[in-house]
Amino acid sequence: MKNVSATFYYSSVGGSWSDANNSSASNANPSVGYVSPYNLLDFAIGYKFLDKYNIRIGVNNITDNKYFTRRTETLVYLGNGVLPGDGRSFYITLGGKF
């Protein structure tokens, strides 16, 4: 159909170290250590109608992967100073051109 669009997004991020010395995580300095690799899947579908309007519905992190993207200097967050990534989320948007 000419008024329907769909987007599938796959992101793969390899593991990395949070410092130049590749230091192991410790309670003394939680901002250093290994950041594990992770994969994300997103999907969205949109529909354009009346030549001016559109609606888009989507879901981010379809598989609800648990991951973290970086480390912090405090132990307030999950694990050894890690900042967790976003879990599964849904959205709906409405748009118009005038």
Image (cartoon, helix red, strand yellow):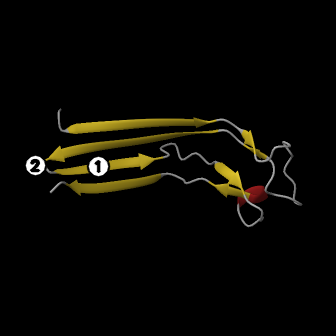
In the rendering, at what x and y percent does residue 35 appear? 72, 45
- Numbered-mark total: 2
Looking at the image, residue 17 sits to the left or right of residue 52; the answer is right
Lower position in the chain sequence, tag 2 or tag 1? 2
Query: Three-letter amino acid code at disc 2?
Result: Leu
What quarter of the picture does the N terminus occupy?
Answer: top left
* Residue 97 % position (x, y): 18, 54
Q: Bin the neighbour count of mark 2 within 10 Å (Cα to Cα): few under 14, some 14-19, many 20 and up.
A: few
Q: Which mark is residue 15?
A: none
- The residue carrying mark 2 is 50
Horizontal side of residue 21 vs 81, given as left or right: right
Which type of secondary structure does the marked residue at label 2 adopt? loop
Q: Residues within 10 Å of mark 1 (few under 14, many from 20)?
A: some
- Residue at far top of view: 1
Marks 2 and 1 sit apart, C-alpha to C-alpha, by 15 Å
Contact (Cβ within 8 Å) of mark 2 with mark 1 = no
Residue, disc 1 = 56
Helix, strand or loop at mark 1: strand
Amino acid type at mark 1: Arg
Pick the front one: 76 or 13 = 13
The quarter in which the C terminus is drawn is bottom left
Q: Is residue 30 above or below residue 38?
A: below
Residue at x-position 62% and y-position 48%: 66
Residue found 64% across the figure and 55% down from its top: 84
Residue 10, position as x, y percentages in the image = 49, 35
Residue located at (60% from left, 53% from top) = 85
Does residue 90 sit above or below 73 in this rendering?
above
Q: Residue at x 79, y 56 (%)?
A: 31
Instruction: Determine whether, in the image, residue 36 is placed left or right of residue 66.
Output: right
